[in-house]
Image (cartoon, rainbow, N blue to C red):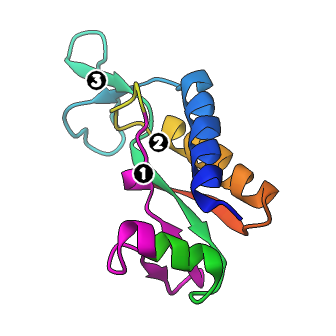
Amino acid sequence: MNYEKILTEAHESGQKALNECQVTMYAWSSETVPLGETYDFKNKPYEVHGNCGCAWVATRERGNGQFVKFLKTKYGQDRIQKDPYRKAWDVPTNEMDMKGYNGQEVEPKYAYCQAYAQVLNDYGIKASAYEYLT
């Protein structure tokens, strides 16, 4: 299998999903509000953005499997982390170039990772997308 070609195709699919993603925007208060009270959005400053977070792709391939070996060679042995909770290997999504997006919203990142993981699955590489809200 040509893993470089697969990763390129996965990135292109992820980029398309990222560009088509619609972020739900919320008004966030810039100060804390005592329990039981509501924030006065009309008269006080606030921020508007989506849910903050990060997203990544993990593969369930074995550590000595061909795909994980390829990732270790491409990114370096120390960059490929094993997730002990999911028993999976994290694909270094921070190396992915998400063109046109540098925000903190999790929705576009997660859409990218879902499409990326789908392409890997289409080629028989077991992969899943995960998100973490911050």
Residue 76 inside the magenta-drawn segment? yes
Circle number at residue 47: 3
Mark 1 sits on what residue? 54
Residue 93: % across, % down: 45, 55
In the rendered image, the residue lying farthest to the front is: 2
Circle number at residue 90: none
- Separation of residues labelled 1 and 2 (CA atoms): 5 Å
Q: Nearer the viewer, residue 28 or 107?
A: 107
Residue at horizontal 64%, vertical 43%?
A: 9
The residue stretch that appears in magenta: 73-98
Whether the residues at callouts 1 and 2 have beta carbons within 8 Å, the answer is: yes
Mark 1 is surrounded, within 10 Å at the Cα level, by few (under 14), some (14 to 19) or many (20 or more) other residues, namely: some
* Precedes in sequence: disc 1 or disc 2: 1
Q: Nearer the viewer, residue 96 or 56?
A: 96
Residue 129: % across, % down: 61, 57
Q: Quadrant for residue 20, please give it.
A: top right
- Separation of residues labelled 1 and 3 (CA atoms): 19 Å
Q: Secondary structure at mark 2?
A: helix
The three-letter code of the residue at mark 3 reads: Glu
Residue 74 inside the magenta-drawn segment? yes
Residue 11: % across, % down: 56, 43
